[in-house]
Amino acid sequence: MEKIEKKRILWIDVIKCICIVFIMFGHFKFIPDYMNAFWSPFCLTGFLFCSGYTFHLEKKYKIFLKKRFFQIIVPMIWMGAVIILSRLILTFNEHVSTFDQIKNFFMQIRGKGDEMWFLALMFGTDALFYLIVLALKDKKKIIASTFVLFIMSYLYSKVINIPLPWHIQMYGASCLFMAMGYSFKGKMEKIFDKYNYLMTFTISFMIFLLLWLIFNVFGTYQPVSFYDYGNNLLFYFAIIFFSMTALISFSKLLKCPKMIAYIGQNTLILYGLHGKLESIYEIFLNKIIFTSNIVINIMLGIVGVVIITIVILIICYMINKYLPFLIGRRKEVKSNG
């Protein structure tokens, strides 16, 4: 397990905070699809980019896998157990047999009880990406090889499109965006930092907004995320590129408040636990207020995200302070000197 936090990279925490907030907001059933299409290009892609940016080779592959097991798989298992238990205790979801729920959880087939799917994907992607970096080392070769893997994932989704265990069919796409984060660190970031962040954000965001309006509001609905390729690969890469450029420049521009940083440091628990709390919140809303008014629904979504974030952050504080092994960390030992 890792020691308690190394020096944080604040703009990375900002990206992760923004991404998890939009993910939580978008998971409310009353939020329309065209709004989800607005943040889908950069939310999960943002997490993969950050993972690539902070990636480094351990001395041994075995040590790396052990570290990631405690950081990803251990939290995934106990949060998965919480989800399964909540289905048994509460009645707001359709029930599948306990055996089938446990089987689906460990099989991790997309669409079959896989609420923790992104964590399963991250573990597999990390394991593969380590081998790619170890073998190639050169960043240009890493980008080229992961682009080939991306094309393989793309063709598989278009020709065969059968979900595989542990979301193997997505590894090519996820490796590519990890490679982009990994390659950004260093020379590319220095070039990026030479430009005015506000100008970069404004230009890239306006282009991204135009693409979103053309394809998802005024045109044919084309949701895009790192694994959902839409109908046009050029549009896919364009909207992801400009949304990620806007996200990075905004995150570097923002003076990071402690709360945003803290949320960014605890996105794993927020990701794992928000789903069932949102279901409870939606049941509560359905009993006291039911409306199709988009403005009211947006406001209710914002209120819901705030409430659920506060609840989970309290849990995060308790885990970080008393049970850090649940998220692959060690207690900070204070010296007496």
Image: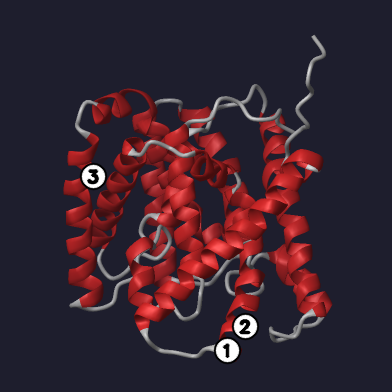
Reply above or below: 130 against 17.
Answer: above
SS of the residue at dot 3?
Answer: helix
Residue, disc 3:
201
Reply above or below: 4 against 181.
Answer: above
| Mark 3 or mark 1: whose residue is earlier in sequence | 3
Residue drawn at the location 48% of the way across and 49% of the way down: 17
Residue drawn at the location 22% of the way across and 26% of the way down: 194
- Amino acid type, label 1: Ile
Q: Residues within 10 Å of mark 1 (few under 14, many from 20)?
A: few
Q: Residues within 10 Å of mark 3 (few under 14, many from 20)?
A: many
Quadrant of res 36: bottom left
| Mark 3 or mark 2: whose residue is earlier in sequence | 3
Q: CA distance from mark 3 to mark 2?
A: 38 Å
Q: Is residue 161 left or right of residue 113?
A: left
- Amino acid type, label 3: Phe
SS of the residue at dot 1?
Answer: helix
Q: Residues within 10 Å of mark 2 (few under 14, many from 20)?
A: few
Q: Which mark is residue 288?
A: 1
Q: Is residue 181 left or right of residue 133?
A: left
Residue extending farthest to the front is 288
Label pair 2/1, CB-CB below 8 angstroms: yes
- Amino acid type, label 2: Phe
What quarter of the picture does the N terminus occupy?
top right
Q: CA distance from mark 3 to mark 1?
A: 41 Å
Q: Which mark is residue 284?
A: 2
Residue 165 appears anywhere in the view: no
Q: Which mark is residue 153?
A: none
Residue 319 appears anywhere in the view: yes
Residue drawn at the location 69% of the way across and 42% of the way down: 71
Q: Position of residue 264 (x, y in %)?
A: 53, 44
